[in-house]
Amino acid sequence: MNTLIKLEVLRILRNRRYLIFAVLLPVGMYLLMINAYKGVDTLNGVSVKAYFMVSMATLGVVSASMNTNAMRIALERKSGWARQLRLTALPSYGYVVSKIASTAVSTLPAIVVTFAIGYTQGVKLSGSTWLILALTLWFGGFVFAALGVALGYAAAPDSLQPIVMIFYMALLMLGGTYFPISGGFGDFAKWTPLALFNQIGRVVQTDSSIGAGPITAILAYAAAFAGLAAFLYQRDRREA
């Protein structure tokens, strides 16, 4: 299984779709958003540049997990590659685990590059805060990688792309990626998975404390997405 994970990582990093959506898009959107909010000093208690640095880093994480991973799974199902792997000695759970692990690893460049651009734009944090923030957002890669695997098996390969895009856009909008969400709708949106990671990332930036609720919710999402991915994979295996 370790060999499969290594191969999956190399395949993702060589994918032009990954480069565009997980690395170039977050950087481009970061520069666009900080210029659009040039007259604003802070958002949700942090500087505009720091706010969007976290938002665009998590954008890269979600893009790597969903636009890259889910669509690749659809292609592998359509080409018969996933079925061929089932005929090998690979354990039944090995394919799902390798997808989640390899996608989580591939989210690191998105985080590092976005952080580097944020630093050049004036975001100043202590060394320990940079490290903790990077690890916090990287952990999110596992959550969204599991969701990407689940979506990859959620429907027939030919009809999957619109489903992935709907989930992708909903996560970004509810997660406060482009602007903070307030009011009654904001009370709901703040418990969506991307909003929780953005919230935790900004708490890390300000060295504040965070309640048990968001942490519990994140762990619940991780368990639910991983369980759903395993269930849908097994369903696809039985139907194959």
Image: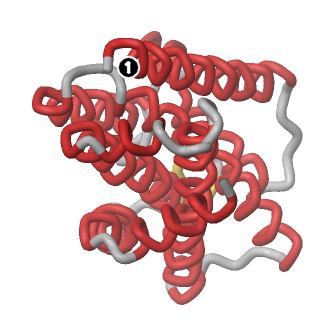
Image vertical order of residue 119 relative to residue 147, above or below:
below
Residue 159 locus on image (x, y percent): 12, 27
Specify the quadrant of the image occupied by residue 35. bottom left
Q: Quadrant of the C terminus?
A: top left
**Horizontal arrangement in the rendering, residue 6 relative to residue 39 (left or right):** right
- Residue to which mark 1 is pinned: 236
Image vertical order of residue 238 relative to residue 173, above or below:
above
Image vertical order of residue 116 relative to residue 5, above or below:
below
Q: Tell which of 164 and 100 is nearer to you.
A: 100
Dot 1: few (<14), some (14–19), or many (≥20) neighbours within 10 Å? some
Specify the quadrant of the image occupied by residue 236. top left
Residue 35 visible? The answer is no
Farthest residue in the bottom direction? 120
Residue 3 locus on image (x, y percent): 63, 65
- What amino acid is labelled 1 in the image? Asp
The structure residue drawn at horizontal position 49% and vertical position 54%, both measured from the top left corner, is 61
Residue 62 locus on image (x, y percent): 44, 47
In terms of secondary structure, where does tag 1 sit?
helix
Q: How many marks?
A: 1
Colour scheme employed for the rendering of this structure: secondary structure
Q: Tell which of 106 and 24 is nearer to you.
A: 106
**Horizontal arrangement in the rendering, residue 93 relative to residue 113 (left or right):** right
Residue 18 locus on image (x, y percent): 34, 65
The structure residue drawn at horizontal position 26% and vertical position 39%, both measured from the top left corner, is 74
The structure residue drawn at horizontal position 60% and vertical position 30%, both measured from the top left corner, is 92
Residue 15 visible? The answer is yes
**Horizontal arrangement in the rendering, residue 203 relative to residue 24 (left or right):** right
Image vertical order of residue 139 relative to residue 196, above or below:
below
Farthest residue in the left direction? 158
Q: Tell which of 35 and 141 is nearer to you.
A: 141
